[in-house]
Image (cartoon, rainbow, N blue to C red):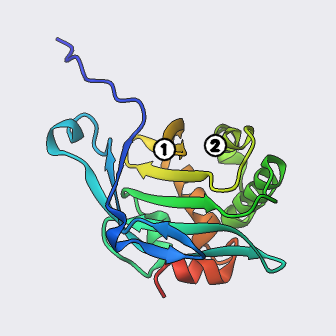
Amino acid sequence: MLRKLPIVIGAVLVLASLCNALEVAGIQLPDSMEVVGVGIPDSLETGPTRLILNGAGVRTKFFMKLYVGGLYLEQKSHDPEQLIEADEPMAIRLHITSSLITSEKMEKVTREGFVKSTGGKIAPIEAQIETFISVFIDKINKNDVYDLIYIPGKGTEVHKNEKFYSLTEGLPFKQALFGIWLCENPAQKSLKKEMLGK
């Protein structure tokens, strides 16, 4: 007999109070994030998973501040290789700080990031990359917030301005995605260091 399982569309984000928020470039990042959806359907009984802010920094280019990036983990870590490989709940928050970022530019740099993260071996995850990249089709505005949330056994969810946008399945995709910021050739070395809390 088949058991009817509850259906949950999109992890539910419950941001902690900003009382202990970290301020980076004028942007306040909550010190923790609670994610409902980890271990579905058991999570509906055990409650949300709390992710804590591991570190945060600013992505810059030509002295312009493009976005603030924060890394959220169950337990703090300074080991980028372990974090990339881990099949554990984690999230990256991107808070856009520049009106100069366009959908086209964000798509371009993200694709370049996947190439660097995988050492050019993107073929196995090309379909997943296209699913993920679709979030940047809509116009990007200053102060838009993207939450990239990996949920083991489910995939990587994208939330834009606290609204669920898409789900991309697979651990290999998650490894490539988080590698954009944490690999040996990251989007920005100083941002990698800051996100690792160093």
Of helix, strand and loop, which one carries label 1? loop
Q: Which mark sits nearer the N-terminus, 1 or 2?
A: 2
- Nearest to the eye among marks 1 and 2: give it: 1
Question: Where residue 148 appears, x then y in whole percent?
Answer: 52, 52
Q: Which residue is mark 2?
A: 132
Q: Quadrant of the N terminus?
A: top left
Labelled disc at residue 162: 1
Tell me whether the residue at label 1 lies in contact with that at label 2, contact meaning CB atoms closer than 8 angstroms.
Answer: no
**Amino acid at pointer 2:** Phe
The residue shown at (59%, 57%) is: 177
The residue shown at (65%, 37%) is: 131
Which of the two residues, 126 or 62, is positioned nearer the viewer here? Answer: 62
Question: Where residue 60 appears, x then y in whole percent?
Answer: 73, 75
Could you say which quadrant of the image residue 52 lies in? bottom left
Q: In the displayed structure, would residue 175 be above or below residue 79?
A: above
Q: How many residues crowd around disc 1 within 10 Å: few (fewer than 14), some, or many (20 or more)?
A: some
